[in-house]
């Protein structure tokens, strides 16, 4: 808020100017300290000034209103001034409490209390089971913050401080992908100011700052001056001239509940790392560069966090395998559960993969800043633990972390792909393997998975995995196999796509929509606001499922009726549906049309069959094979000729 004032921008610019072209990266930390000290001083001054002005104006208005001859014009003018000051104070309080307002001008209501309470409940840890120091004694449930904090710190420091040594040699090394020479040369170029400006521009002003307290808004206010400081620092780090600023190694780890688990056990808490915004800007630049050459390194069957790759291809490919005609008698689909996948990434293995992939040393040196020599504090119920080192894992919350994870696990996936009778699909760590026989299963469990564990420390939890026999009548479960199932949960979808799974999905989604509507109904919104909330907050989950699991017509009707009732509220007079759904520039209200939205998503999915990709996804190949064998035409030809097809196991 104060950054917009010209004289404050001038003072901060003066501070930044004194640190341009730093001789050592640690000077950036000193610069940040100077800026924070200055900002704290003016924040305190403006806060006191605003409070004093509000009090004085309120008292003056009160006296004028109670005077024998109140001056209405003066009172109106003072009330306008008071309103502006109160709005300024209100915005400050809003930012401090991290409440985001979805519509300008709305007033507080019970909705915001409910939302704030729900958010706090998901963040606060009310109690934890703490192991007893006495062997073989039961754990005790504690609600003491310091005891919970100590237990959480011990758990995560143990998890992150026991990296496995990298073996002198491993067959897995031969499956590490490599970059082309042209890619290496491009990645070796110094980071430019334009790259820094681009990532700064993309960031959200209201994202939480890191431990240093400087938000993205600060970097957006002084991009040119900051680039003259950070670009030289990036160069010093990339050439290994100096280590990064000490503040880049300081993080805070917050713990959030995992869905459908008991939050009273520390194993069921997910650690999210909060880093400083300057190092996240660097990570974003590295991630953007990596994405340009990702196709050289990461197979198309890995779709997680990969640019221009669709999660739906993973889901539909797996569904196509589940619905194959006449599969081999011992064939299976194995859905893998990784034990702490991101937390167990070996730093020595990641270093080895980066070198073996032929990443330039300059790029590797910059990448090391996100996971080498890092310390973190556990934050629990607004209390912080003492810092401890993080010696393994990639930080969840870092923009580059998902791509680094993909890179570390790709050699395993390449090894699996090298077996002709094994096929794999993945979305980050959501891994599904298709095998032809029990021999394939034994190869995975007795050779491939142990090799990966020996080399990297990654652990497959077979007892939490799922095994789906493609020919249940002829499949003999192996000893100590994962639970046998007739339905797989893949990325939120119950597969295979069939009538039973559809019948169980849509009643649940309809109930969730109605529950969400009930939750937001207490919120005082304009008609435009209710339409906005409907299309984002209420219907977002529907859009995710609708592309693959088309809702039956009666559920579309029920969903549309619920949305109509919410948006129109108690109004009895409103435009006809076909006019309300028109866009604003055509005189409509942009009212949600669920049937049309579903059709758009279906059309987008079908359009994939017209892609000129030489190697289309497996589900498209399966559909083409089906239409050719049953209708003597490819799927695109059937669509162009408007020929009706009824395919029982696919959503088209």
Image (cartoon, rainbow, N blue to C red):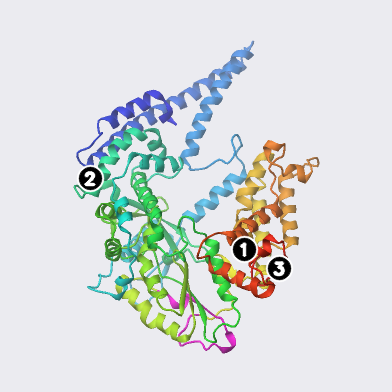
* Residue 172 visible, this angle: yes
Name the N-terminal-most of marks 1 and 2.
2
* Label 1 CA crowd tier, 10 Å (few <14, some 14–19, many 20+): many
Mark 2 vs 3, N-terminal side:
2
- Secondary structure beneath label 2: helix
- In which quadrant will I find the C terminus? bottom right
In the rendered view, does 362 fall on the left or right side of 135? left
Quadrant where the N terminus is found in the figure: top left
Question: Is residue 144 among what the camera can see?
Answer: no
State the CA–CA distance, disc 2 to disc 3. Answer: 62 Å
Is 360 a magenta residue? no
Residue 15 image point, x, y percent: 29, 30
Q: Earlier in the sequence, mark 3 or mark 1?
A: 1
The residue where tag 3 is placed is: 645
Does dot 3 land on a helix, a strand or a loop? loop
The residue shown at (64%, 48%) is 535
Location of residue 452 (image quadrant): bottom left
Which residue is at the front of the view, 71 or 427?
A: 427
Crowding near pointer 2: few (<14 within 10 Å), some, many (20+)? many
Q: Mark on residue 548?
A: 1
> Percent from the top left, x then y, of residue 205?
45, 40
**Frontmost residue, 395 versus 618:** 618
Count of numbered circles in the view: 3
Identity of the residue drawn at 49% across and 59% down: 309
Mark 1 to mark 2: distance in Å?
Answer: 49 Å
What x and y, as percent, mark residue 397? 41, 54
Q: Mark 2 points at which residue?
A: 236
> Residue 316 at x, y = what percent?
57, 67
Residue 73 occupies which quadrant of the picture? top right
Question: Which region shows up in magenta?
Answer: 460-482
């Amino acid at each position: 808020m104060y950054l917009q004032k010209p004289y404050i921008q001038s003072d901060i610019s003066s501070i930044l100017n004194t640190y341009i072209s730093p001789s050592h990266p640690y000077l950036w930390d000193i610069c940040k300290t100077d800026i924070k000290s200055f900002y704290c001083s003016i924040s305190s001054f403006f806060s006191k000034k605003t409070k004093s002005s509000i009090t004085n104006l309120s008292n003056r208005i009160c006296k004028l209103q109670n005077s024998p001859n109140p001056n209405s014009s003066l009172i109106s003018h003072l009330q306008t001034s008071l309103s502006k000051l109160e709005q300024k104070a209100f915005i400050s309080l809003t930012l401090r409490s991290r409440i985001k307002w979805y519509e300008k001008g709305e007033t507080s209501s019970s909705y915001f209390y409910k939302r704030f309470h729900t958010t706090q409940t998901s963040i606060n840890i009310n109690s934890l089971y703490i192991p007893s120091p006495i062997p073989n004694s039961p754990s005790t449930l504690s609600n003491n913050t310091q005891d919970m904090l100590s237990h959480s710190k011990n758990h995560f420091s143990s998890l992150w401080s026991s990296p496995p040594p990298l073996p002198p040699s491993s067959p897995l090394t031969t499956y590490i992908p490599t970059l082309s020479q042209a890619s290496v040369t491009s990645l070796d170029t110094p980071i430019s100011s334009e790259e820094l400006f681009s990532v700064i521009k993309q960031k959200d002003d209201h994202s939480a700052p890191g431990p240093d307290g400087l938000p993205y808004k600060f970097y957006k206010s002084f991009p040119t001056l900051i680039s003259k400081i950070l670009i030289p620092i990036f160069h010093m780090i990339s050439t290994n001239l100096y280590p990064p600023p000490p503040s880049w190694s300081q993080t805070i780890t917050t713990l959030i509940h995992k869905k459908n688990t008991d939050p009273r056990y520390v194993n069921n808490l997910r650690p999210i790392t909060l880093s400083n915004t300057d190092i996240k800007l660097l990570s974003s630049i590295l991630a953007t560069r990596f994405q340009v050459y990702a196709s050289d390194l990461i197979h198309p069957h890995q779709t997680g966090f990969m640019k221009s790759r669709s999660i739906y291809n993973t889901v539909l490919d797996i569904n196509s395998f589940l619905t194959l005609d006449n599969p081999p008698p011992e064939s299976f689909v194995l859905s893998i559960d990784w034990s702490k996948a991101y937390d167990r990434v070996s730093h020595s293995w990641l270093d080895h993969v980066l070198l073996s992939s032929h990443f330039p040393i300059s790029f590797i040196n910059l990448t090391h800043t996100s996971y080498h020599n890092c310390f973190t504090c556990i934050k629990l119920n607004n209390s912080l633990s003492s810092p401890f080192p993080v010696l393994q894992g990639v930080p969840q919350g870092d923009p580059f972390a998902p791509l680094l994870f993909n890179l570390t696990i790709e050699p395993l996936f390449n090894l699996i792909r090298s077996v002709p009778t094994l096929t794999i699909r993945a979305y980050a760590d959501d891994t599904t393997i298709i095998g032809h026989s029990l021999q394939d299963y034994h190869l995975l469990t007795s050779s491939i998975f142990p090799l990966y564990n020996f080399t990297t420390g990654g652990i497959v939890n077979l007892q939490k995995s799922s095994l789906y026999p493609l020919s249940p009548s002829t499949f003999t479960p192996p000893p100590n196999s994962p639970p046998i199932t007739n339905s797989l949960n893949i990325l939120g979808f119950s597969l295979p796509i069939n009538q039973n799974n559809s019948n169980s999905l849509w009643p649940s989604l309809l109930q969730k929509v109605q529950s969400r509507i009930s939750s937001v109904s207490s919120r005082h919104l304009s008609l435009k606001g209710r339409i906005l909330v409907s299309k984002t907050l209420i219907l977002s989950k529907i859009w995710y499922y609708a592309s693959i699991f088309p809702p039956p017509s009666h559920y579309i009707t029920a969903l549309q009726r619920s949305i109509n009732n919410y948006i129109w509220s108690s109004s009895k007079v409103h435009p006809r549906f076909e006019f309300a759904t028109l866009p604003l520039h055509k005189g409509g209200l942009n009212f949600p049309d669920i049937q049309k939205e579903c059709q758009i998503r279906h059309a987008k999915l079908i359009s994939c069959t017209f892609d000129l990709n030489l190697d289309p996804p497996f589900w498209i190949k399966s559909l083409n094979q089906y239409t050719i064998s049953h209708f003597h035409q490819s799927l695109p030809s059937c669509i162009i000729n408007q020929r009706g097809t009824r395919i029982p196991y696919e959503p088209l």
